[in-house]
Each structure stands twice: as C-alpha cells, then as structure tokens.
Image: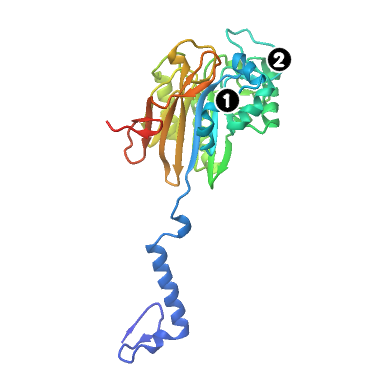
Amino acid sequence: MFTNPLWEEPFNIAAGGNKYFEKGNMKILSITFFLILFLLFPRAGAAQEQIVRISFVGDIMVAGLPGDLIIKGRDPFTAFADFFKSGDINMGNLETSVASGGKPLNKPYVFRAAPAVVPVLKRYFHAMSLANNHSGDYGQGALKETFHNLKKGGLSYFGAGYNLNEAHTPLIIERKGFRIALLGYNEFFPRQFEAGANMPGVAWSSEDEQVVADIKRTIKQDNPDIVITYMHWGWEDEPLPCERQKMMARKMIDAGATVVIGSHPHVLQTVEYYNGGLIVYSLGNFVFDEYDDDAGRTGWLLRLNFDRKGLLNWDTIVSYIDPKTGFPYPKLDMKSPCGNRQSYEIASCTAGKPLKE
C-alpha cells in the first residue's frame, strides 16, 4: 500500500484499488489525462500560427508629373497591386506635402501634391511616414493641411504632428493579434521643419538620446510586439550608408527596435543584421520623376513576415521607374536581398524566391 499525493488516501493495489475509481478521483484522473494531451499535442487553433506581413517602399513623390497623371485618372501603383494586396500593412515615405495652400520655401526642390492623390494612396497604403525634408516645403500651413487631408482620406501617418509630442508619438496598428509600433525620423536639412512644443513639424533624429528614449518609452507604455523605425537619412546618391547611419541604426536596435528602415539617398543601400535586428539602410525611390539614371530609378518593395517569435523571413522585390511617367514596375528577374530566421544571413532572391547557385 502507498499514498498518492494527488488523492491523499491509501491506494490498496491488492484490494483492486477500488477507492481509486470513485467518482471524485475519476474526475481528477480525467483532468490529469487531458492536461497530458494538451502538453503533448498542439491545440488545433494553434496548429497554424498567425503571420503578419508588413510591406515598405521608399520615396513616394506624387507631385510633379506623377501627380498630374493621377489627376488625369492614372494610377502609379497598378503594376504592384498584387504585391500590395498580399500585405497586411503597407507603408512608404510620402516625399511631399499634400495641400492646396502655402508658399514654397527658398530651397532647391519643393514638392506639393494635390489632395486628389490621397484616395489613390489609400487604395494601397495603410500609413505614410511624413518624417522627411519635403513634407514642410510649403510651410506650416500646408503641413497642417497635409495632416487634415490624410486624416480625412482615412490614411494614417507618423513621424510628424501638430507639436513635438505628437511628432514623437508612435503610430500603433493592430493586425491579426499583433501590435505594431511605427516611429519616423528625419535628419536631413532644413531643420526648420522640426516640430516644436507648440509648432507643427516632423520628428528630428539628431538628438540620439531622444530617439532611444522614444523607443524605450514605446516598448514600456504601448507593449508592442514589433517596433519599426523609418528613417530619412544619409547622403544622396551614395550606395553605401555613412558611419552616422550605421551608428544610429545600431543604437535603435540596441534600444529595442525590431527593424530599422531608411530612405532619402534616392538610391538603394546595403542591408545588414545587427544584434537580432534587421537594418535596411535605403529602399531607394518608388514613385519619382526627377531621375535620369538607373540607380535613381531603382528601388525595393520590402516584405517582412512576422510570427510570435519575431521576424520569420523577409524579401525584396525590385522596382524600376518608367522615366516617361515616374511610375514603378516590378523587375521579377532581378536578384535582390532576402533572408530568414534559420540562416541569419543576407541571401539573394529573385522575386522573393531563393536562388539555387
């Protein structure tokens, strides 16, 4: 005879253990049995784990020729429609104000798109970064009008706001049970676009401590599953990131960012892993009509797939801008970077499919 601690009464094997099969003990046995099954076999609902796909493109300049064509009924994103359709969240850098008013600032290039572009953007995108060196081209009034027009059209934005606090507040998007936090920063002049305590503008990133504090505060207060920073940085037409970009990107990963993405150089730049995070230094141009060279016409659509463990895999689709329209078209036969959690190396893919070399 021995005492089983689950039942606290003697179990007499010689006597057949009748006490073991009494009603109360059978209930405990059943619970124990199902607990064992639960641990050994996954739940049916968890057999297929949720994956959220987040897609990014680089600079979208829908003023000038692309904007004129949109007003005439053309759609610059049609060639990528199927790729955008597969994304749970699609985003880009809106490289222009969207307004009817304002006066152009004294700078070499100024961009202002008509409000009519918003429905076309909304058709494909869920949010836009406004943290760049052109969102304020027509002054604070036009920037506030941009906020209004995007909100009216149902298109979210981040990296800018009516004041400093709002510009540094993350956009939180929820999809498939995931909480995604998005922060945007500009660090290319003119700095007069920077938001003030009571002044509209963009989030500025040259104060490293502020950016690090934003990321840490976001993680603590908003409890996101994914934190992505979208930067407007680097030197134009340079295919390699500068030391400032590398240093800042790594600081953001160390602070808790999952992925760091960049734009502004108007050409593609390198990709790297660092401390468990992914850094894509520049996605290049996506919609633009100001470039007459292949480097300026080439960009990437970045697709990030996340599961509950983090970044599962990612790939890039090469885009090439038609100089006659400024519209992008996919180049499905061109190699571009990709990767997955198993290898933790930057590989080459063709339209998202690993190459066998």
Q: Residue at x 33, y 92 (%)?
A: 15
Q: Front-most of 193 and 56?
A: 56
Q: Which residue is mark 1?
A: 203
SS of the residue under disc 2: loop
On the rendered structure, is 160 left or right of 258? right
**Residue type, label 2:** Gly
Q: Front-most of 269 and 15?
A: 269
Q: Quadrant of the C terminus?
A: top left
Q: Is residue 149 above or below residue 46?
A: above
Q: Which mark is residue 258?
A: none
Does residue 346 appear anywhere in the picture? yes
Q: Front-most of 315 and 184?
A: 315
Q: CA distance from mark 2 to mark 1?
A: 21 Å
Q: Quadrant of the N terminus?
A: bottom left
Horizontal and vertical percent position of residue 339: 37, 35
Does residue 199 appear anywhere in the picture? no
**Residue type, label 1:** Ala
Q: Residue at x 46, y 78 (%)?
A: 27
Horizontal and vertical percent position of residue 113: 65, 18
Q: Front-most of 302 and 71?
A: 71
On the rendered structure, is 109 left or right of 309? right
Pointer 2 and pointer 1: residues touching (CB < 8 Å)?
Answer: no
* Residue mark closest to the camera, 2 vs 1: 2
Q: Which residue is mark 2?
A: 102
On the rendered structure, is 15 left or right of 290? left
